[in-house]
Amino acid sequence: MNIYQCLVNIGKAPDECIGKNSVIVFKSEDGELGVGFYGKLLAPKGKSKAFKPAYRTKLEVDMLDVTPDYLLSLIKELHRVAKEKGIEVKGVKIEEGE
């Protein structure tokens, strides 16, 4: 299932999410990353770990055709390269209660 279909399944109009900070990057206590939308973790699936929202980022049109797992792999690669270069990935801070 691609991201477009995931958004429709959770009752969101994908066109209204484009360009907004709709993508949530989650992080577990041991540093594992996850990705989701509107508080719902979509990837990785089947994990029993507790993931907490870390930051938001914008949803781009090109993301609609990929799966949450593929988007997560891109985010992980971004974090890996940033760490190698000594750059901190921040995104848009999630406020308490969001």
Image (tube, grey):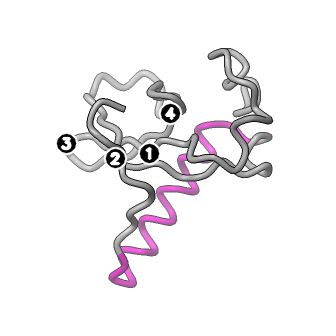
Q: Quadrant of the C terminus?
A: top left
* Disc 3 residue type (three-letter): Glu
Task: State the SS at label 4.
Answer: strand
In this picture, residue 8 sits left or right of residue 42: right
In the image: residue 30, left or right of residue 27: left
Task: Say which quarter of the image contains residue 86.
Answer: bottom left
- Are the residues tagged 1 and 2 within 8 Å (C-beta)? yes
Q: Mark 2 or 3 closer to N-term?
A: 3
Q: Relative to 8, does residue 60 appear above or below in the rendering?
A: below
Q: Which residue is mark 4?
A: 43
Q: Residue furthest bottom?
A: 85
Q: Nearer the viewer, residue 89 or 85?
A: 89
Q: CA distance from mark 1 to mark 4?
A: 10 Å
Q: CA distance from mark 1 to mark 2?
A: 6 Å
Where is residue 38? Give x, y as percent: 51, 28
Q: Which residue is mark 2?
A: 54
In this view, the residue in front, 68 or 4, is 4
- Where residue 10 sits, quadrant-wise, is top right
Three-letter code for the amino acid on which mark 1 is drawn: Val
**Mark 3 and mark 1 in contact (Cβ < 8 Å)?**
no
